[in-house]
Image (cartoon, rainbow, N blue to C red):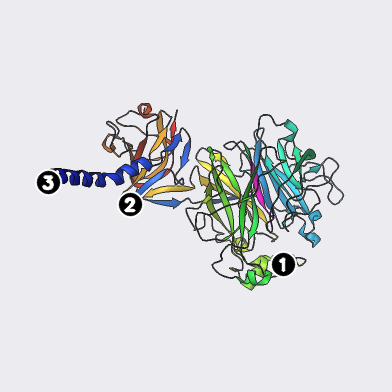
């Protein structure tokens, strides 16, 4: 009897010690990596970090691509969309005839710039809209010469799209640039164009609706290959959102809360889903003035979000610097006091989203791109990226995006910003070394490609493990040929062998041992 009880106790103790690992194995979610590229920002991919850390990428300021040097452009450039059409990059940007002294919709003009390489841009003469009695300008509009003013523009890549409707716009019918500003919904007409120059009304009306304040006062729209529908991320004012402090700007306009984002989708551009407020992963709430959300061209199932963070009332400029910059103001807007456009320090923050999700992933609270040492970029509403599209390859190992600078100043312009391909976030290991272990994953490729960079003394080695953490024979760290250098698509080999097809469809883990190195992305390629 005693022996039986002792045996039972031993069995129960053994079972209890094993249960946590059994439950962990049973509950571990297997990540379907497939043969897609995966950025290191993906929280579903990374399981554990030891001695290594996630590090924000470093954007690099490049040349000025467009200067506001035409009277219809004024001092308030905004980038509506960028897209590639028939091998040429197009940029639709909004100018503002600030010399008119008003903020009427008739003072705004949608303009076009084009580029073969995304680096050198020109302003083509379209000859559709009259300005000051003449037509030699780059203003886009309707065939009757009416210019486009406020609208959300985007490219429609679907094969069935008629050639003269390839570029589309959601246009406020009544000319009210904030048709949804009082929660009335967006009274809109869908417009179409072959390339963005000449537009016409389509037999489509958008029924975008929201009862929330300041809905549709900004946003981005795109066709999602991953979701097979149009997706829009629009701005609204979340009055219930907590605030870390009450700013001078809040007191002046008498409104609590923060600018935020909601999501709505449509398969036909006519009927749109009920708006869903976007979550921010439990991070502190801040004003997100615009949230350009872009399917990444190297993996359309990853949405990159270059969001403009608005910091009301934060002033970095002295009165003397403000006067020297000659910053204009809109005296006709009662909600915009005269001080406003010399404050509100704007920067860019980086977020990510998954198709179909109403939650943003925000791995860093720090700025992705600071205004920098140029004082002109510290006025309000600077540093805005393209609302639709806007992240494009401009070299074998380089991508670029574009931001507006010197808002409401005579030197208003658009600047190119470059980044290493996939370089939004890296897993960085110091000289002392560090490791990353992925979550269990399955893949469908034949070899493993890494986007990485090391120092001359650094390296990366990879081990393939089974789901329980045991090294696969012949694919351990000691078998891996060290990866040294700087490559966007470096092939991992084990004693000269790269083929990993034997493990296709089986849950595995990848263990990375790194020294003085950055890992930006990985992909199992066919």
Whether residue 239 is situated above or below residue 459 in the rendered picture: below
Give the secondary structure at mark 2: loop
- With 356 as the anchor, is 505 left or right in this view? left
Give the crowd class for mark 1: few <14, some 14-19, many >=20 residues within 10 Å.
few
Give the crowd class for mark 3: few <14, some 14-19, many >=20 residues within 10 Å.
few
- Could you tell me how far apart the alpha carbons at marks 1 and 3 are, in whole angstroms? 84 Å
Q: Given this view, does label 3 or label 2 mark the residue nearer the observer?
A: 3
Of the two numbered discs 1 and 2 on the same chain, state the one appearing first in sequence. Answer: 2
Give the crowd class for mark 2: few <14, some 14-19, many >=20 residues within 10 Å.
some
Of the two numbered discs 3 and 2 on the same chain, state the one appearing first in sequence. Answer: 3
Depth order, front residue of 312/320: 312
Quadrant of image for the N terminus: top left
Image quadrant in which you'd find residue 339: bottom right
- Could you tell me how far apart the alpha carbons at marks 3 and 2 are, in whole angstroms? 50 Å
Quadrant of image for the C terminus: top left
Labels 3 and 2 touching (C-beta < 8 A): no
Residue highlighted by disc 2: 51
Q: Is 187 inside the magenta-drawn segment? A: no
- Mark identifier at residue 335: 1
Residue highlighted by disc 3: 2
Q: Given this view, does label 1 or label 2 mark the residue nearer the observer?
A: 1
Of the two numbered discs 1 and 3 on the same chain, state the one appearing first in sequence. Answer: 3
Tell me which segment is drawn in magenta: 214-222
- The structure residue drawn at horizontal position 30% and vertical position 40%, both measured from the top left corner, is 469
- Which residue is outermost to the front? 1
Labels 1 and 2 touching (C-beta < 8 A): no
Give x and y (percent) for residue 240. 60, 63
- Say whether residue 383 is visible: no
Q: Given this view, does label 1 or label 3 mark the residue nearer the observer?
A: 3
Give the secondary structure at mark 1: loop
């Amino acid at each position: 009897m005693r022996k039986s009880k002792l045996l039972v106790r031993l069995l129960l103790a053994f079972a209890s010690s094993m249960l946590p690992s059994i439950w962990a194995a049973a509950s571990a979610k297997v990540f379907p990596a497939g043969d897609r590229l995966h950025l290191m920002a993906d929280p579903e991919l990374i399981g554990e970090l030891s001695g290594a850390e996630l590090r924000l990428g470093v954007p690099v300021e490049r040349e000025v691509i467009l200067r506001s040097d035409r009277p219809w452009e004024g001092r308030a450039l905004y980038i509506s969309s960028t897209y590639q059409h028939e091998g040429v990059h197009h940029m639709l940007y909004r100018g503002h005839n600030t010399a008119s002294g008003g903020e009427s919709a008739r003072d705004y003009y949608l303009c076009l710039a084009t580029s073969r390489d995304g680096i050198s841009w020109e302003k083509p003469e379209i000859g559709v809209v009259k300005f000051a009695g003449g037509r030699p300008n780059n203003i886009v509009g309707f065939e009757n010469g009416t210019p486009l003013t406020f609208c959300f523009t985007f490219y429609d890549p679907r094969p069935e799209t008629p050639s003269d409707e390839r570029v589309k716009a959601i246009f406020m019918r009544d000319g009210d640039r904030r048709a949804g500003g009082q929660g009335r919904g967006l009274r809109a007409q869908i417009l179409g164009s072959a390339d963005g120059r000449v537009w016409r009304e389509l037999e489509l009306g958008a029924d975008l609706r929201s009862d929330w304040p300041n809905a549709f006062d900004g946003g981005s729209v795109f066709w999602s290959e991953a979701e097979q529908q149009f997706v829009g991320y629009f701005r609204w004012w979340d009055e219930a959102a907590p605030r870390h402090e009450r700013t001078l700007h809040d007191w002046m306009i008498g409104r609590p809360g923060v600018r935020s984002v909601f999501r709505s989708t449509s398969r036909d551009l006519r009927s749109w889903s009920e708006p869903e407020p976007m979550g921010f992963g439990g991070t502190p709430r801040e004003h997100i003035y615009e949230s350009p959300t872009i399917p990444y061209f190297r993996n359309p199932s990853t949405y990159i979000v270059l969001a403009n963070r608005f910091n009301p009332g934060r002033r970095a400029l002295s009165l003397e610097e403000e006067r020297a910059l000659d910053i204009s103001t809109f005296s006709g807007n009662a909600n915009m006091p005269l001080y406003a456009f010399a404050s509100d320090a704007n920067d860019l923050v980086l977020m990510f989203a998954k198709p179909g999700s109403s939650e943003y992933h925000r791995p860093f609270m720090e700025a992705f791109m600071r205004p920098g040492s140029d004082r002109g970029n510290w006025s309000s509403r600077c540093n805005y990226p393209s609302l639709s599209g806007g992240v494009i390859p401009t070299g074998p190992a380089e991508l670029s995006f574009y931001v507006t600078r010197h808002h409401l100043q005579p030197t208003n312009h658009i600047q190119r910003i470059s980044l290493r391909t996939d370089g939004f976030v890296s897993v960085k290991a110091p000289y002392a070394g560090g490791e990353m272990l992925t979550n269990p994953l399955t893949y469908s490729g034949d070899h493993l490609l890494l986007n990485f960079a090391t120092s001359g003394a650094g390296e990366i080695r990879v081990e393939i493990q089974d789901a329980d953490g045991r090294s696969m024979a012949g694919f351990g760290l000691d078998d891996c040929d060290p990866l040294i250098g700087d490559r966007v698509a470096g092939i991992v080999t084990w004693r000269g062998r790269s083929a990993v097809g034997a493990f296709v469809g089986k849950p595995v883990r990848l263990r990375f041992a790194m020294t003085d190195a950055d890992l930006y992305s990985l992909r199992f390629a066919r």
